[in-house]
Image: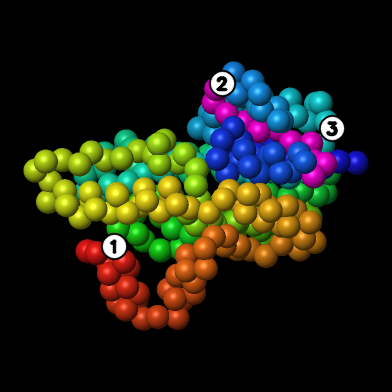
Amino acid sequence: MSKVVLITGGSSGIGKSIGEYLTDNGFIVYGTSRQPENYPNSKFPILQLDVKNVSTIKSTVDTIIEKEGHLDVVVNNAGAGITGAIEEIPEAEIKANFETNFFGPINVIKQVLPQMRKQQSGLIINITSIAGYMGLPYRGIYSASKGALELVTEAFRMELKAFNIKMTNIAPGDFATNIAAGRYHAPLLENSPYKKPYGDTLNLMNSHVNSGSDPQMMAKAVLKVINTKNPKIHYKVGEFLQKFSVVLKRILPDVVYEKMLMNHYKL
């Protein structure tokens, strides 16, 4: 029996690559988008879902279970970028980012758990970010929202162990996707004290995304995790130096690591 997979944010970028790769490997895949009508040629069905709207999550999950009878893997991939000096990012935008990157995945998890508990099986993969392991300048809110999801997964795993439901994080580095286009950018204000360092950092971040790794690397990592009997808590996927930065944070004194980051961002 083919495993049924739900991927939030499955219409483009990493989510699309994961969906196509799993479809090619014999999985029954359902992706989601807030506007599924924009993707009529998708290799797998795209259903309407907004992670900030619980009723759309429930409707989509119910539709899949009614049609397939089971739901085996959920990939919480939908997310949003945000940049800016924290002082200058409107509170509403900070809250909106957490709604998508943190509360959204939790909403999805809450909707699928009853079915997985009934099955006594299931796997939930949260797509976080290597940025979630460190507070990055002008990406602090993004780092915080992804870091929060990393931590809550650790707690969830222990709460779900008795039901044979597994959960893990996969933290990507920079990948060549359209995330920069959909990211909220706090505007570069002419009279801002952050104008030059924020502008320089923004250009650096965009260049990293544009020259990022092939999203197929993430798709292969997801399949490997699905086929792992007991997935680890944390996985990192990306260029060596991006993954190694997490190791350095663990072993270097805080002030040394901070100086390394500031040198990298030329601050």
Kind of residue at badge 1 = Tyr
Q: Are marks 3 and 1 in contact (CB under 8 Å)?
A: no
Which portion, as a residue range, is magenta? 25-35
Instruction: Work out how far the residue at label 3 is from the one at label 1, CA to CA, in angstroms.
Output: 50 Å
As drawn, which residue projects farthest toward the front?
211
Residue plotted at (68% across, 39% down) = 19
Q: Nearer the viewer, residue 89 or 181?
A: 181
Residue plotted at (50% across, 43% down) = 177
- Locate the C terminus by quadrant: bottom left
Residue plotted at (37% across, 51% down) = 207
Q: Would you name the residue on which mark 1 appears?
A: 265
Residue plotted at (45% across, 81% down) = 251
Measuring from the top left, give residue 152's x and y in whole percent: 55, 55
Can residue 45 be seen in the rendering of this structure? yes
Measuring from the top left, give residue 227's x and y in whole percent: 79, 56
Badge 1 density bin: few <14, some 14–19, many ≥20, Cα 10 Å: some
What secondary structure is marked by label 2? helix
Q: Which mark is residue 219?
A: none
Q: Would you name the residue on which mark 3 appears?
A: 69
